[in-house]
Structures are given as structure tokens and as C-alpha cells.
Amino acid sequence: MDASNYRRVPVGVVAPRDAEDVAAALRVCADAGVPVVPRGGGTSIAGQATGTGVVLDLTRHMNALVSVDPAARTAVVQPGLVLDRLREAVRPYGLTFGPDPSTHSRCTLGGMIGNNACGAHSVAWGTTADNVAELAVTAYGGAEYRLAEGWTGAPAGLRELVAGNLAVLRTGLGEGFPRRISGYGGLDALLPERGTRLARAFCGSEGTLGVVTEAVVRLVELPAAPALAVLGYPDESAAADAAAGLLPYGPLTVEGMAQDLVRDTAGLPRGGAWLFVETRDEGAARSLVRAADALDAVVVADPAAQRALWRIREDAAGTATRTPDGRMAWPGWEDCAVPPARLGSYLREFRALLAGHGLRGTPYGHFGEGCVHVRIDFDLVSAAGVARYRSFSSDLADLVVAHGGSLSGEHGDGQARAELLPRMYPPEVMSLFHAYKDLWDPAGGMNPGMLVRPARLDENLRFAVLPATPFAEEVARCVGVAKCRSRETGGTAVMCPSYRATGEERHSTRGRARLLHEMLAGEIVRDGWRSAEVAEALDLCLGCKGCRSDCPVGVDMAAYKSEFLHHHWRGRLRPPSHYLLGGLPTWLRLIARLRAARLVNLAGRFLPVPGLARERTLPEVAGVPFTRWWRDRRTPLPGAGAGAGRGGGGGPTPAPEAVPASDASPAPASDAAPTSGPAPTAPLAPVTLWPDTFTDHLAPGTARAATRVLAAAGLTVTVPTAGPVCCALTYVSTGRLTRARRVLRRTLDTLGDVEGPVLVLEPSCAAALRTDLPALLPDDPRAHRLAAAVRTFAETLEQYAPHWTPPRLDRPVAGQTHCHQHAVLGDAADRRLRDRAGLTGELSGGCCGLAGNFGFEPGHHTVSVACAEEQLLPSLRSAGPDTAVLADGYSCRTQIAQLSGHRARHLAELLAEALAPDEGPDPM
């Protein structure tokens, strides 16, 4: 599978190391009569990166930037080089590669050449074909060619084919516009008056002619100070009608979208639709605004503000993958294009066509070149739904052609549209396409079923093999756009740490989703839930949940892994780590009950624990758990916790103990207000401080520090002490879901109905309560109420003590944002609290690599360290001596201590240390 709706099973995959390997593979396959499909990042949305023969994965080894010539503004690249790597390498010279598709962080130059990719800046810099100077190509059977301009290097017979079809080439391809990508639409580049540009004509051939093994590409100059003009229009049609009129002003981009794709219009000018127009400088942007007939407009020159606005446009692309009611929307007609002057009329008719077929989709895209992106809520499972997909595709092809457009505007035709090419091109052009294909590939071995002699657009659909189960629906939601293969750093993105460490597709979120897809299909992976291949691929999933937030369609591989492990080990003896680490709450409670912490810690220093990684030192167990400390020092308030101690399923249960967080006196909470700010606004009920397993038994000082800060903020705290409460995270992460449900039900019975916020200091436990709890107990209303009550430390202070002024620390910070906080909870409140406390700097993105039980399991140490080395450890090495090391997650603090020697602290600890002695005194 690629990023399309199609699935074809290859006989094998080859990862060639160089051009000689490519030639050898093509000779062997030709001798055996086996087809070949060249593949880059696999982000194609029309099916052209799938095939039934041998797939050549050009990303594993042939991914080098061979050379850069800044003076000539050219670069020599291998086909597997990711676009962003090229752009990063040439940026110091003030250069870039002009075409920039949205998958720039993982698409490859070879794939861009194959699809003639474009992107937002093609208004200024053209398509990939416009930016390719030379190509080294190997054909089926092993013959090698060097294509540039002129007939030198051309395959035998090509010159004669062009000479015999000059009239067809001059008139049959239509009055072209830049986004005419469909078919071999670039063949007119071979006309003598156009310079006989062999390399340009080869672009867009979708792997059907040969394999590119090297390319010389042209580079363009980056504008020194680009500006962004955002123009507001009453509606989408008005914006589309206006786009073509902006082109004479020389914009770099003209992107359009309507209000139904925008969640938050803050920062946008008035209107129901917008054009995002980038120019070379602020003066050009203001001139364009004066000439535009817009309802409203803003011009932004500040780069950070531009990025914020562009993020709205980028988020719209993610929104397009779902309809307003949450249904998945699929590719298939994502990029057809019409001449820009016809775009407004086309969009009006397109929306009417959607409605006529009972379908929904929200168009957006490159309005300056008439290219429209849209995902549509096709039913690609039922026979009736597939029939509707076919009839709609036929009608839409006719509509595009009626407006003088191209079925593909930048992504290629693949299987999704190739069958319909005769509606766009007359018979003589289609005959020429066939002859061109046969001249390059007489045996028909290169990517058969694409462009000419195509497969039907409604066969090989990937959904047909799946069972009708909820889990299959979840797995199928991976659309394959492969953001999980990105290696971007420097931001907050987490996904996908194991792929970043290994570089193997099976360790990406997409790769794992595809393996689960095959497991459910049962054709290739035939042993179902007991599959060793799937277990091996999922073994290196850290359960970071980064994909839940970073994946455009919200694939939650951590949840899928738990479900798989649940079935995989059902009725069988599990690995020791599942019992040791998965049962950690039980073991720690037993150690506390026996008061055996000192003995356990001593044994952990000298004796290896069977089933755990020998490279790891076991964390020390606290001699006094937080809950015992709390019980021993409690001072109950009269009437505290009233109404909060009734269970939901078994009658009355003991109320949690409620005390002022300072434990200094039974005075009203307002008496504990700090001297550094106005009196806080107390919540209607006490803050319930959740004694999670990690904080309670391994880091009780964090909870004690939190009580001091909460007291300083004037808040009253209650701690559940009637019995053990647990979020069941360790059981969920090891796939012991039956046990997890029992633990959660027992927790809800013990806790009773909670009034007010539930503060969870450990981000992974907070995330488990917010997401796993209601997912595992969907029919228990108590689960949903508890999930809704969960707050982080910073959220609690911001929402329930908004007037409290935190102590000033005025120092830089480094450390780690917990991946579950990034993915589930969000860290906006934490950033604001750090800012108010004078803590400057950014925490690392990515994942620390320990990830709960993951880093302690045998065989994971190398990957665990590699994850930390990507962002976290380099940031700590570069930190100054006054830098505070901050990590709210216990796993993150443990990883930092074991790999760097730094002592990381929870934000509560940093704030507590800065409090004055009379602010929230520690009862210790």
C-alpha cells in the first residue's frame, strides 16, 4: 500500500545500494518476467507506488546528496533523498528546490520526478519537471540512459516517434496550463521548438518507463524577507474567482481555503474564505492587497507570525481527512486542476456534483494554479458504495475536461484516474502514449497497470480484504501519508521515535498499521493475532502516543499495540516483563506493606532481575510512600469532602481525606494565601491529588512539593486513602486489558464520585485516565466523569488559582516534555506557568526513549538510548550551569539521570524550592 485507496501484494522488495544494483535487479526481473515498481517515500495517493512484482525501495541506501554547485545553482541527488534534506543542505547558500509538496519532510526526489510534483510555490517556480536538468535512467532489462536536452542519450526509436507525431504533439495535448500533469502530458517537451527536453518529458511517467538512479536538479534563490498577505472573501467562489487576477503581481504562492476547514479564525481577516498569498517582500504584499478586491486583508512580515498563519492552512489539510461528523474522507480525486480563470465556476459545479451523489468533501488548495485538493467520504467497502465511487469519478472526469482541466494536477494518475484518461485526451494522443511506453518498456515490465493499459479504478481497493470489525476500521484509518517517516527535529513533534532510531518502515506508525492490516486480511500474515511478524514490528513501539496527535488522521498505535498484545498472549504464559513491569502497582504496594524498600533497593543494586534489561539500574523505591506520609500527617477539616465519598456501584465508601495542602492548621484556605500575589479564587470542592503509582512509591517528594505549591496558591487538597487507586497504565501498555478493566472498576468503586478537579502529577497517568479509562469502560458514566475531571499541575493552578503569582525563578530550563502530555494533555498551561515563573527556553520535543516499561525490557536499550540522543541528550549537553533540568514524567527523569547524570525535577519541585518559608510550609 501507499497513501492511496489501493493494495497490491508484491512478490518481494529490493533495497538497492547503487545504480549497479538497480540494473542487476532490472535484468533479473526481466529474465523472469516479473514486473518492477520503483518506490520512494510511498506517499503517492493514486496507487502508483504499489505493485505485484518486485518493489525497489530507493530510500534505504540510494538517498545521498551527491554534490551542490551554488554558483550554477544545481545539485546532484539520488532518488531516495528526502526533499527536506536537500533544502536544508542548500539553505546556507540562500537557495532551495522550488517544488514543495506538503509531504516535503518525507517525500523523495525520485518520487517527485515520477509524479511531477508541484506544491504551493509552483506559481513562481514551476513543477518538478521545470526544475530537472538531467536524469540517469535504467530501463527494464538493465539498459542505461542519460537524459538532458537534445537527442543524445535517447532510447532508439524515440526521435523517429516524435518526428512522426509532430502534429499530434502540437495540437492534441490541448492548450496547456502548468498543472497539466495527467498521462505523459509532458511529451510536448520533445518538440524541436521546445528544445527536445528529454529529461523534462520523462518526468511524470510514474515509474512506467524506467528507474531514475540520479538527477541533476536546478535550485532557486530564496527570498530574503518574504511577506504573507491573507485576503478575506465572502465565500469560496469569490476567493476562487479572485485568484487568477493576482497572478500578474508575481506572487510566490496563492493558496485558498473556505471556512468549513478552519477550526479557529483568530488572526484571519473577515470573510468566509481566504487566499494566502506569499510575496517576495512586504512592499509587494501591500501593493497586491491594494489591487485585490478583497473584503478584508492582513499583511504579515514577521516570520513567526507568518508561521502561525501558515499553520492554519496546514491544519486545514488535516481537517480535510474527516467530515464534520467525524467520518473518514478518502483520496482518489485529491488534485485535479482547471485553468485558474475557470476555478470559481468549476468549484460551484463541483460542490453541486458532490451533493448530487450524496457525498461530502471540502476543497482547498493551490488556487493560483487552479489545483484543488479534496478528500471525499466515499464508501469503499460496500458494493453500492464502490459503484457510487465509480459513477462519481466518471462524472467528475467529464466536469474537469469540460473546464479544460487535467485529471491530475500534481500527484499523478496512478490507478485512480488512468482509466479515465481517454476522456481527457483524444484517441491519437492515447495511441502516442502507448507507443511511447512501448518504446521505453517493450516487455511491459515497468509498473504495469498505470497510465496505459490501466487497471480499473475500482479494483484492488485495500478495504475489500478487511473484516467488518471496529478494530479493522481503526487500522484502516491510516491513509499512508507517512508523516511518521519524517525526521524533522527542533519542534514539539514526537512521532515516530522508533522509526527515527531504526529507519525501517516496519517500525513506523504506517508500517505497523499496514502489518496489522495484513494480519486482519489473513492473506499474507496468516497466523492472525499470534503473528510473530506483527509482534516483532510492534515490539519497538514505545507507546508514546505521538501518532495520536501528530498523525493527520489520529492513528493511535499505542492503543493498537495494547489490543494486539491482549489477543497475542491470551491464554499463554507472557514474557516476565509483563508480570514484573506490567504488575508494578501490585509489587510496589506489596513492598510498601512489608516495609521492604531498603531490602529491595539493596538487592536491585547487586542482583540482576530476570526478564529486565541488564543495562539498566533499577530506580529506588521510596521508604515512605506519599500516601503513608499523607495519612500520618493529616489534619481533617470539619465537613471536608462532604458528598464526595459515595461510590457509584457498591453503596457508601470512605471519603478521601481532605486537608489544607500546607497541613499547617485547620484554618480556611484563604488564610494560606501567598504574600506575593492577591488572594486566589478557591474551587468549589477540594483539589483531589491523585496518588499515581510512580509518584506515590518512587517519587513521593514530587507530591509533597505539589502540596506546598497548592497551599501557597490557597487551594485545599484531598488525597484518596480509602484504598488503592490506579490508572491501570502498566496493564494497558503490556496488553493485559482484562486486568486493566478490573483495576479501573475497583478504582472507581474506591474513589466514589469526585467533586472538583483531579490533579495527576504524572503525565502518563493523566493521559491514561483521560483516554484509556473511558475507552476501556465506555458504558460506565463514572469513567467519563473522572476523565473529564483530570487536570495537570499547571492546569489546576491556572484554572483554580488564577490570581496566584508563582515565585520567580528567572533561569533557563532544559529537559523533556512528556510525550503523553504532548499527545493527549497539551502543554499550553505549562508554558504559561513557566513564563510567569521566569523559566526561559524550550523543552525537548521527541521522546526520552525510556517510555515506562519499554526501556527496561530486554532488547530495547539501544533504541531507547538512540531516541534520547536525537534531541534530549544534546540539549542537556549544551545547557549552561545555571540551567534547571525539568521533566514532569518519571520515566523522563529516570532516563535523564541514567544517561546524563543530571537530576531532573517536576515543575512542582522547582516552584516549591523557590517558595518563601512561610508559603505553603512543608509539614515534614
Image (tube, rainbow, N blue to C red):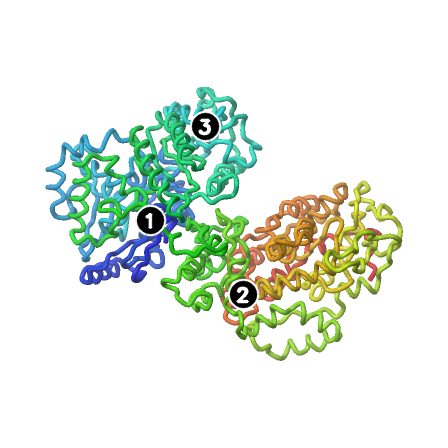
Q: Give the distance between the C-alpha atoms of the residues marked 3 and 1, in whole angstroms.
A: 30 Å
Q: Secondary structure at mark 2?
A: helix
- Which residue is under mark 2? 566
Query: In this rendering, does residue 914 appear at all?
Result: no
**x, y percent for residue 107:** 38, 48
Reply above or below: 827 against 61: above
Q: Quadrant of the N terminus?
A: bottom left
Dot label at residue 236: 3
Q: Earlier in the sequence, mark 2 or mark 3?
A: 3
Residue visible at 72% across and 69% down? 622
- Which residue is under mark 1? 47
Dot label at residue 735: none
Q: Is residue 762 left or right of residue 850?
A: right
**x, y percent for residue 635:** 87, 58
Reply above or below: 920 against 851: above
Residue visible at 52% across and 64% down? 865
Callout 1 amino acid: Gly
Q: Label 3: few (<14), some or many (≥20) within 10 Å?
A: many
**Near-viewer residue (151 or 435):** 435
Q: Give the distance between the C-alpha atoms of the residues marked 2 and 1, in whole angstroms.
A: 33 Å
Callout 2 amino acid: His
Q: Earlier in the sequence, mark 2 or mark 1?
A: 1
